[in-house]
Structures are given as C-alpha cells and as structure tokens.
Image (cartoon, rainbow, N blue to C red):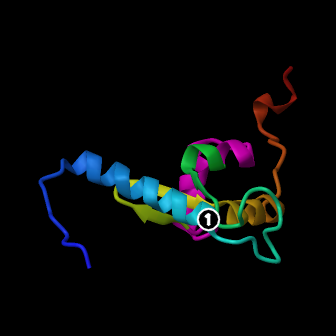
Amino acid sequence: MEPFILSPVPYAQLLEDLRAIFRHETNQRPATAQGTSDTPATDLLTVQEAAEMLDVCPQTVHEWKRRGLLTYHKMGRRTYLKRAEVLAALKSEKRTVKTGKGAGRA
C-alpha cells in the first residue's frame, strides 16, 4: 500500500476536486432498466437548470422544495435535484392560466 501524504489544500480547491470526483463517479454508473437514455437517471441538476426544464422561475423550484414536492440534495452550499425527480414533477404539476385583472391583456 502506498503512503498517503496530506498537504494543505485550499478549501475551494478541495471542494472543486470533490465535485469533479462526484461527477465522474455518477457518470460511470452503468445504465439501469429505467435510465437507458444518454443521460443517467441520477443526473444532477442545479436549481437554475431544473427551473429551465420545468419552465418556471428558480423561486418556484425553491418553493416546491420547501413544500416537499421536489426532493433535493445538498453538497456544501449548493443544492442539486435529480433529473428523474424533476421530470416526474413536470408530469405531475399542472400549469394554471392566470385569471386576474391583467390576464386578458395582450
């Protein structure tokens, strides 16, 4: 077994290295019966990416997280959502048409 030598590493560099390892490991998993497409079912999205996929603003994604409609995973200060769970939310959430004062305006 090779010796393991610790050296001082800045926190930002350590965090970036861990993210790179995490991305590499999640992309190396074999495709399951559910995730036979090009992107694995456990692909992680940022809140902004999830909002774009759902065609809502990021505040709506945060509200859905708070209400428990979307499960999320924290890595450091960042929040990630699984692509499969975002797609499931896309199917379950119905978009409503606004019926307020300005709804009929062009």
Name the residue rendered at 78%, 28% in the picture. 102
Viewer-proximal residue among 24 and 85: 24
| Residue farthest along the front direction in this orientation | 1
Magenta-drawn stretch, dominant element (helix, strand or loop): helix
Viewer-proximal residue among 95 and 7: 7
Circle count: 1
Q: Is residue 106 left or right of residue 78?
A: right
Name the residue rendered at 55%, 49% in the picture. 47
- Region in magenta: 51-71
Task: Measuring from the top left, give residue 68's x and y in whole percent.
Answer: 58, 71
Task: Measuring from the top left, give residue 51's x and y in whole percent.
Answer: 65, 46
Q: Is residue 24 above or below residue 106?
A: below
Task: Identify the amino acid type marked 1.
Answer: Gln
Q: Is residue 65 one of those drawn in magenta? A: yes
* Quadrant into which the N terminus falls: bottom left
* Element at label 1: helix
| Residue indicated by mark 1 | 28
Q: Is residue 17 one of those drawn in magenta? A: no
Name the residue rendered at 75%, 70% in the picture. 31
Viewer-proximal residue among 21 and 88: 21
* Quadrant into which the C terminus falls: top right
